[in-house]
Image (cartoon, rainbow, N blue to C red):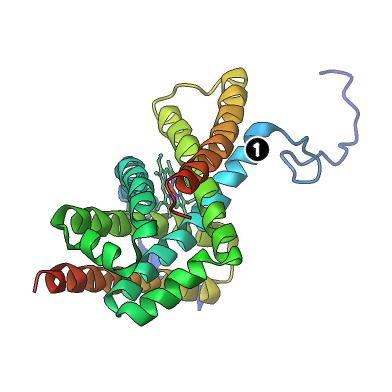
Amino acid sequence: MADAPPVLRARPLSPHILQWRWHITMATSILHRVTGVGLYVGLLILAGWALALASGPDIYATYAGLLGSLVGRIILFGVTVCLFFHIANGLRHLVWDFGKGLAPHTANITAWIALAFAGVAAVGVWVLAAVMGAL
Amino acid sequence: MSEFRAAQFRTALGRARGLGSAKHGVGHFIGQRVSAVALLFLTLWGVAAALSVAAGGYDGARTWLASPVNAALLGLLILAGLYHAQLGMRTIIEDYIERPITKAALLILNAFVGWGVAALALVSILKVTFGAGS
Ligand code: HEM
């Protein structure tokens, strides 16, 4: 451009965390990481369950009691939400790896689907658990 | 110190060879995807199993784990999960931690936790499985 200003102004840095409009695909990207860490915790709880089961009835009863407490149930429900979100969003990742579904419009829709699926599936499993008398 | 770096004595081609891709990076990427596919099935099985085991108490759980199929699938779920989570945590640590010492310490901790929990879980599963029949 011939009429460009002679003095270069400081250029904005982009993408920049403070200059960035929140959008849904950004949230799901971050949530994939968060739920991955949540599932890691869930896996440690599962391994602890196997250890408790191998350690006799008393320790198992204590461990099951902890899991069945209010705090324990809230944590387990959180792990369930993490699992179903991570599964749905992980499937998005696997589809993207084939170069599909990356158009912004499609990615926005599948992001909402993953979020909705996580909520519905997690609540569904816990309702099922209640119905089966597993709670 | 810097004047005597070995790289100074190397040819341009030798330096370039040392800098390029070692062709190993993609291994973690593939491992993360393959374990993801395995975990897709294993975790869904795990949810169904949890629902059926939760109400049975200690004896019910021991009977459940006495089945070789349940024991094998639970072992696979924990192993594949730890493998996948360890790769994932490694990426997270490498993304956020800049100080080399801290990064190395966390990466080592990540490996220790992974292997340690895997060993504990497997021995526990086998103890119940083999102990139940007697
Ligand atoms: C025990 C269950 C699981 C645990 C503990 C777990 C944990 C994690 C963690 C910690 C990460 C790293 C996140 C990041 O780098 O931001 C990750 C990434 C990933 N997970 Fe999982 N995950 C589990 C199950 C699954 C399942 C069932 C799927 C498949 C549907 C899946 C698909 C993926 C994919 C594709 C990535 C890579 C994402 C990327 O490249 O950014 N995961 N997982």
Residue A41: where, in percent of width, then height?
48, 62
Q: Is residue B118 left or right of residue B133?
A: right
The answer to whether residue B11 is seen in the rendering is: no
Q: Chain of mark 1?
A: A
Q: Is residue B93 above or below residue B4?
A: above
Of residues A111 and A130, the one nearer the viewer is A130
Residue A56: where, in percent of width, then height?
30, 80
Residue B130: where, in percent of width, then height?
12, 70
Residue that numbered label 1 is attached to? A26
As shown in the figure, which amino acid type bears the numbered disc 1? Met
Image quadrant in which you'd find residue B83: bottom left
**Measuring 22% from the left and 73% from the top, which residue is drawn there?**
B123
Q: Is residue A33 left or right of residue B124?
A: right
Of residues A66 and A38, the one nearer the viewer is A66
Image quadrant in which you'd find residue B74: bottom left
Q: Residues within 10 Å of mark 1 (few under 14, many from 20)?
A: few
**Measuring 82% from the left and 38% from the top, which residue is drawn there?**
A11
The answer to whether residue B80 is seen in the rendering is: yes
**Measuring 78% from the left and 35% from the top, which residue is drawn there?**
A21
Residue B99: where, in percent of width, then height?
58, 71
Q: Is residue B21 above or below residue B63?
A: above
Image quadrant containing the N terminus of chain A: top right
Of residues B25 and A107, the one nearer the viewer is A107
Task: Tally the marks.
Answer: 1
